[in-house]
């Protein structure tokens, strides 16, 4: 089966998405997500200029060979742009293969290892009443595990906290990137954060009891010793995980954090190959792999990372914010359903406009996601609907410390 056509589709229903659409000589269509939040057009160019010409005429069934060809023949390996582009090709080819087989993709990955995927939602609040409301709202949507983010007294705006309450009703979700010509600037003070966060988790545990799994994202802002301190301070509140405690580049930093706390650690949403994980998995410095299929070379490469992780009792915790498109989310669900070492799936929920552009077959019931049983990954892209939402410039925000220094975020 030959790849005859390859198009890169950019659409911005609620936010920007980049989708690779492959068509074979048998008329089978495969979709892959190539969305790199705030840097979308770099992947569009990489795909259009350098990858699409290589795909036309290739055998659509040779997924591993195509992966190795795109990774090795470029000479320039790794990096978020390259690995998002390769991921899109990889997922589109898995979609095609599963459609050709007449099976949902998870069947080709070994079949279901569970009935559904435990998902966590994002609760946030500027104060405790708003946060409690947001947690209850997520519970009413069916979530059985909740990420908790909070504003910090003295800081104007903190990432991951819904910024305003709308007049027509409460707003419980934040959008990672803002549609604007320049990135929004936020302020940051780690000492204020370290003082405040444990008090919030104490209040949440008192209100919601010991059973509800709670997660927290530190967004790469702490030094190892600060992260160790936070992990220790949060131990009484029994977190499911503390995410991105330190900047991700330095794998050794996690040794110090690990030596000081039993709070489980998750990391990796900005990683893109197994090399970013090698040391921290082998030394068992983390508990959860946060990579998305979309940013880690697709199903082919992320499955290898997760199989490696399984040898060390490290589980999956795949990235699932709104900037992973419905195509990327579907791929994650098929992979998560099939692997043995599934941990939890992040699920931020897309907006209505996005759901009209991408027709999806997944279900979310009783807190569990399931990718559905349509052949392939179970997502169709409505080209006409997509065309109605052209690209819009959008950036992630960034941080400055109170003295004006640019900080990690
Ligand atoms: C998460 C995140 C996101 C990312 C965003 C970047 O854990 O879901 O940290 O909010 O910041 O997806 O593109
Ligand atoms: Mg995160």
Image (spheres, helix red, strand yellow):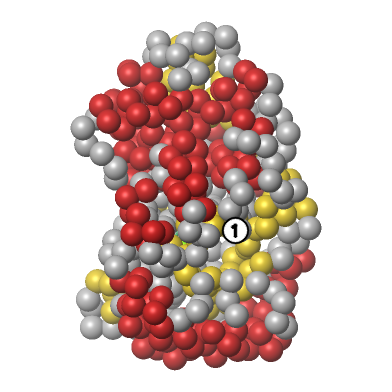
Rendered location of residue 318, percent (x, y): 53, 53
- Front residue (pair 260, 318): 260
Q: Residues within 10 Å of mark 1 (few under 14, many from 20)?
A: some
For the point 43% across and 27% down, the residue is 64
Tell whether 105 sits left or right of 225. Answer: right
Query: Up-down: is 241 above or below 396?
Result: below
User: From this viewpoint, is residue 17 visible?
Assistant: no
Rendered location of residue 141, percent (x, y): 74, 61
For the point 29% across and 25% down, the residue is 49
Q: Residue furthest front?
A: 311
Q: Which residue is under mark 1?
A: 343
- Front residue (pair 283, 256): 283
- Front residue (pair 8, 221): 221
Count of numbered marks: 1
Rendered location of residue 20, percent (x, y): 46, 29
For the point 61% across and 49% down, the residue is 340
Query: Up-down: is 114 above or below 376?
Result: below
Rendered location of residue 162, percent (x, y): 54, 69
Give the SS element for disc 1: loop
**Label 1, ligand 1: CB separation under 8 Å:** no
Tell whether 277 sits left or right of 125. Answer: left
Query: Up-down: is 123 above or below 328?
Result: below
User: From this viewpoint, is residue 304 visible?
Assistant: yes
* Quarter of the figure with residue 238: bottom right
């Amino acid at each position: 089966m030959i790849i005859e056509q390859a198009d890169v589709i950019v659409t911005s229903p609620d936010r920007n998405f980049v989708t690779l659409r492959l068509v074979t000589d048998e008329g089978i269509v495969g979709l892959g997500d190539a969305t790199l939040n705030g840097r979308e057009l770099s992947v569009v160019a990489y795909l259009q200029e350098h990858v699409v010409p290589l795909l036309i005429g290739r055998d659509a069934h040779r997924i591993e060979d195509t992966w190795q060809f795109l990774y090795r023949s470029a000479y320039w390996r790794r990096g978020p742009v390259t690995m998002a582009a390769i991921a899109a090709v990889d997922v589109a080819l898995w979609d095609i293969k599963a459609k050709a087989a007449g099976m949902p993709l998870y069947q080709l990955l070994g079949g279901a290892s569970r009935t559904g995927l435990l998902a966590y939602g994002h609760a946030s609040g500027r104060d405790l009443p708003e946060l409690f409301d947001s947690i209850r709202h997520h519970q009413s949507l069916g979530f059985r595990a909740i990420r908790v983010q909070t504003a910090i007294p003295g800081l104007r705006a903190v990432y991951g906290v819904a910024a305003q309450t709308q007049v027509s009703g409460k707003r419980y979700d934040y959008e990672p990137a803002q549609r604007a010509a320049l990135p929004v600037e936020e302020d940051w003070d780690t000492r204020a954060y370290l003082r405040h966060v444990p008090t919030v988790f104490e209040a949440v545990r008192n209100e919601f009891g010991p059973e509800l799994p709670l997660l927290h994202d530190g967004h790469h802002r702490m030094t190892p010793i600060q992260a160790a301190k936070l992990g220790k301070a949060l131990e009484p509140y029994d977190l499911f995980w503390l995410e991105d405690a330190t900047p991700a580049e330095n794998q050794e930093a996690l040794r110090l954090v690990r030596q000081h706390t039993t709070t489980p650690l998750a990391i990796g949403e900005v990683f893109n190959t197994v090399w970013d994980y090698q040391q921290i998995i082998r030394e068992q410095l983390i508990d959860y792999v946060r990579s998305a299929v979309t940013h880690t070379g697709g199903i082919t490469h992320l499955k290898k990372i997760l199989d490696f992780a399984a040898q060390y009792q490290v589980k999956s915790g795949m990235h699932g914010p709104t900037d992973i498109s419905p195509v990327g989310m579907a791929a994650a669900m098929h992979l998560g359903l099939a692997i043995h070492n599934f941990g939890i799936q992040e699920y931020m929920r897309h907006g209505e406009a996005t759901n009209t552009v991408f027709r999806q077959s997944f279900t979310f019931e009783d807190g569990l996601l399931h990718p559905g049983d349509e052949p392939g990954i179970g997502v169709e892209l409505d080209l006409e609907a997509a065309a109605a939402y052209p690209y819009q410039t959008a950036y992630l925000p960034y941080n400055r410390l109170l003295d004006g220094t640019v900080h990690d975020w």
